[in-house]
Amino acid sequence: MPKKVLFITYYFPPSGGSGVQRPLKFIKYLREFDWEPIVFTVKEGEYPSIDQTLCKEIPPNLTVLQVPAFEPYKWYKKFTNRTQDTKIDRTVLEGASKSWKERLSIWVRGNLFIPDARKFWIRPSVKFLSKYLKKNSVDAIISTGPPHSAHLIALSIKRKFNLPWIADFRDPWTKIYYHQQLNLSKWAQKKHLQLEQKVLKQADIVVTIGKTLAQELAQIRELPVEYIYNGYDESDFEPYRNVPLYEKFTLTYMGTTFQNAEESIFWKVLHTWLNNTTDAKAHFQMRMIGKIPQKVKEAIHKAGLSEYVYFSPDVVEHTNAIEEICRSHVLFMSIVQDKNMVTGKLFEYIASRRPFFCFCNLDGDAAQIIKECGTGIALDHNNVDGICAYLTQQFERYKIKDYHLVADSESIQRYSRRYQTKELARLLDKCIL
């Protein structure tokens, strides 16, 4: 009989966006490794996007438990004159200019809603799960965050039922790059640190998304931290392996993007490359797939690229995004310069086996993974010659119709979602011994 694990996740289909991919893919494959997941999630959550196609990936006959939560974002939308159907994500922290209402809202978010705006989900969740677990036994718990409120639910259940608990950190907590933008008081900063320490020290196993972040969390935990990469799901790519490429030489960005120094420089470099490369203007297009902030669109327009660029709707189904990258000649992405950042999108770029370049910390985890898999290159955003040389190399391939894919090596296969779930099952087995 398979062992049972209670999987606590705020993001679950029909939620879209990057936050849902890791828990969904773990849940999708856990049965293959003798673990039956029982999902606990929010009912009708305030998701950054909706993607109904992801519902097809939920395993059949899966037990899904749901509890509604009070969502203060509804007040935030009304207070800042946003419509109620506006999707809220961390992009609200981006940009230099904010109204006094937005500044006040961010202060309230950081100082009163600790650890996050989903804090009101904690108490009803603990109450519900306490009743459920008195009648239904499980062998272990997994909580995944952010939101880190999920970890606090698991912490309470751990204390009540003495169940083995794995805390999964998809992002840092107090060390996340936007944490300083919350305008935290000394009291609030101390409270965040205290809660972070409780979770890290009381979980039986802590796991995260990469080597460097594991090392950083281990310093707080004072015990080793495991890491399991996000990976890619081969079943997402199978329908598009032989899809025809775009007629024009196509450079594509997939996912949410933020206005930062790397991208601001790149738009200017790209314009210069187009002007200096024979025939490039006649054959070039750029496709921006995902939620692109208005400031990024303005920067692209200012760089003189408007006639070459296509902006998708803000909400793109995951299957459509995968098709876009598989139809492109070159991909690019930008990761904040923290060494510990390894986004899920990176593995999907690798899995597409299309050439790509990534602006990232050249000594960080992402750069090492890119080098290992050999499907793309890591670049410093100031490396103008390197950017132009790579674009020229791929444009020359386009002109002679050299569209062959990078070989599907063992290095790439090691980052499959199935393989990563096997690693999670190994940790689950370890924590119940």
Image (spheres, helix red, strand yellow):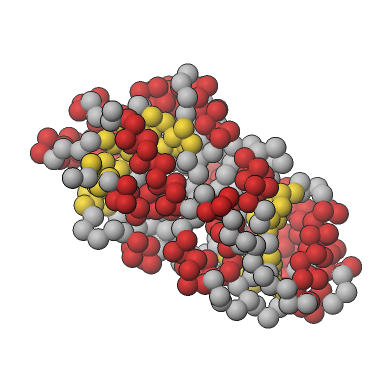
Q: Residue furthest top?
A: 222
Instruction: Describe residue 125's horizontal placement relative to residue 250 as left or right.
Output: left
Instruction: Describe residue 382's horizontal placement relative to residue 420 as left or right.
Output: right
Give the x, y percent position of residue 336.
Answer: 64, 44
* Screen quadrant of the C terminus: top left
Q: Residue at x 46, y 58 (%)?
A: 233
Give the x, y percent position of residue 243.
Answer: 56, 76
Q: Of residues 192 and 144, which is closer to you in this image?
A: 144
Give the x, y percent position of residue 394.
Answer: 76, 66
Q: Of residues 429 and 190, which is closer to you in this image?
A: 429
Q: Of residues 345 and 402, which is closer to you in this image?
A: 402
Q: Residue furthest left?
A: 135
Q: Residue at x 20, y 28 (%)?
A: 161
* Screen quadrant of the N terminus: top left
> Is residue 223 depicted above or below 79 in this figure?
above
Q: Residue at x 26, y 41 (%)?
A: 5
> Is residue 47 depicted above or below 304 in this figure?
above
> Is residue 167 depicted above or below 99 in this figure?
above
Q: Residue furthest front?
A: 410
Q: Residue at x 57, y 44 (%)?
A: 342
Examine the rendering and report whether any part of residue 150 can be seen. Answer: no
> Is residue 2 depicted above or below 308 in this figure?
above
